[in-house]
Image (cartoon, grey):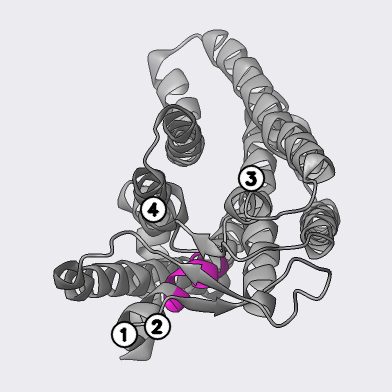
Amino acid sequence: MEPGNDTRILDFFLLGLSEEPGLQPLLFGLFLSMYLVTVLGNLLIILATISDSHLHTPMYFFLSNLSFVDICFTSTTVPKMLLNIQTHSKVITYAGCITQIYFFILFGVLDDILLTMMAYDRFVAICHPLHYTVIMNPRVCGLLVMLSWIMSALNSLFQSLMVLLLSFCTDLEIPHFFCEINQVVHLACSDTFLNDMVIYAATVLLFCGPLTGILYSYFKIVCSIRGISTAQGKYKAFSTCASHLSVVSLFYCTILGVYLSSAAAQNSHSSAAASVMYTVVTPMLNPFIYSLRNKDIKRALKSFFRGKQ
């Protein structure tokens, strides 16, 4: 097909994690299992926070929103990959690819911003405990979440519209298991300078910005914890941050690892395989991180299941 503006009739081809026919049943079973665990685990967190009135606090309000976003984030990519494996097809329509880009960026940025809000919540709780209920009141928490949705939606809409302006040639193979925006942009046969600038600007503002906020919050938290006189008090204060700090470390380290390795590696399939860490593995592990050492979540889940019996 000749390059032009009429890209609506084009189909892209997702090459996936492997083109070996013998590996497809294994990949299908593995990713189906991981997807079901992700949905079930995060759904249980949401149900626990809703059903138990003791968990109607800012920290668990943000956690339930994070769990919902994690379900949506994984659902943006994995079901399509499973469908392609099952039907022995690599095709994703042009409209489907743009839609996937939109929702992938939307929920990815939401994850990022919600983790920042949770860090701010811990900062206020530990550094300004006497003003916590005033600062983190339900209205403020609701406004913060609404603002994060608006910012994420506007960013993903703008980046998706920028992709719509591109013209594509005959090379429409994406060496990935989903429509990753960098991969799609680099398939275009028109100039991608503006797209690259938008992607870089969004990365600085919506990835580096929240990360800076998280690091600052934990710097102030550590300074505040060091001022606590007793070892028991220090442990109690830090234990409230342990789960969130684990999730933040997993989220940012996997993303940084993926993009640093993809910049150095020549194999696109290796980059796609590494992307599984933050697109599938991290949302799957988050419920376990928050529930295994959290007595409140465990108690809420036990009460919820007892009530269903």
Residue 58 visible to the viewer: no
Q: Mark 4 or mark 3: which is in front?
A: 4
Q: Residue furthest bottom?
A: 309
Say if 253 sits above or below 83 in the image: above
Q: Amino acid at mark 2?
A: Leu
**Mark 2 or mark 4, which is nearer the start of the sequence?**
2
The image position of residue 53, as x and y in percent, is: 58, 68
Q: Which residue is mark 4?
A: 276
Say if 19 sits above or below 81 in the image: above
**Mark 3 or mark 1, which is nearer the start of the sequence?**
1
Contact between marks 4 and 2 (CB within 8 A): the answer is no
Q: Amino acid at mark 3?
A: Asp
Q: Amino acid at mark 4?
A: Val
Q: Which residue is mark 1?
A: 86
**Mark 2 or mark 3, which is nearer the start of the sequence?**
2
Task: Identify the secondary structure beneath mark 2.
Answer: helix
